[in-house]
Amino acid sequence: MVKDDLLDMKKTLVNNLQYFLKRKGINQTDMARDLNFPETTVSNWMKAETYPRPDKIQLMADYFGIKRSDLTEKRATNIMPYSSQFIKVPVLGEIACGEPILAEQNIEDYVYEPIDSLPAGEIFALKAKGDSMEPTIPNGALVLIREQSEVENGEIAAVLVNGDTEATLKRVKKQGDTILLMPDNPKHEPYIVNQNNPARIIGKAFSFKVSL
């Protein structure tokens, strides 16, 4: 195989991985964690410095629910994929104190989402209330959340406050040992997490939709 052909293969894989990561609403770090790949290995793939072995490509294809060729072959840019597979995503309402997040009494509704648009893991939804996350997330938007107990600095999370009874959406900022729950709307004050104001991250926001 000539050098140019190998470089072309690497770039094709990078473009396809970027596409499917974006469609799934995750980043390369999420994928590396879910598949137990070293982050440096995935980073080298994404920089087209190395090329994964066939077994790793198959694992990624299975992870995205696609064929291996969808990762290794050039994709037509004018074709939109269609999936007929949908899953039922619970919409959380009032939280019952002490109960698991996805307990039946915490669920007020369900929505159906195409499975290939969702990241791996447990998924739930929250309705944004108020304007604290505007203009990023408008009031009334349905926000899709991946259940997880930690997020990266600067990511938007679903957080339990008020004695684990209220779920709110805030951007998590870490300053040393201090954690701030930041609104995107400057009209609102940040929530400082401490002993008097406890909070618990329950998931990472990865997309939202608004009804017209």
Image (tube, rainbow, N blue to C red):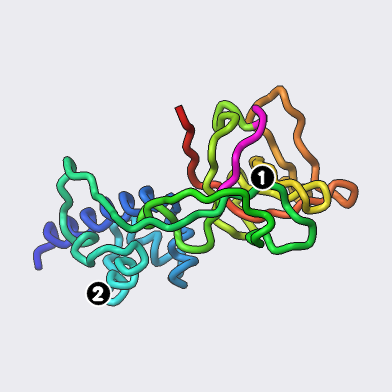
Magenta span has 131? Answer: yes
Q: Quadrant of the C terminus?
A: top left
In the depicted view, which residue is nearer to us: 41 or 106? Answer: 106
Q: Residue 21: percent from the left, percent from the top?
A: 37, 53
| Magenta residues (range) | 125-132
Residue 114 as seen in the image, left or right of residue 160 = left
User: Quick one: label 1, few (<14), some, or many (20+) residues within 10 Å?
Assistant: many
In the rendered structure, which disc, 1 or 2, sits on the residue that comes first in sequence? Answer: 2
Task: Give residue 113's position: percent from left, percent from top.
Answer: 42, 51
According to the picture, the residue beneath numbered tag 1 turns out to be 172
Q: Which mark is residue 133?
A: none
Q: Quadrant of residue 54?
A: bottom left
Tell me the amino acid under the disc marked 2.
Pro
Going 64% across and 41% down the picture, which residue do you hit?
Answer: 171
Farthest residue, direction right: 196
Count numbered badges in the picture. Answer: 2
Where residue 150 sits, quadrant-wise, is bottom right
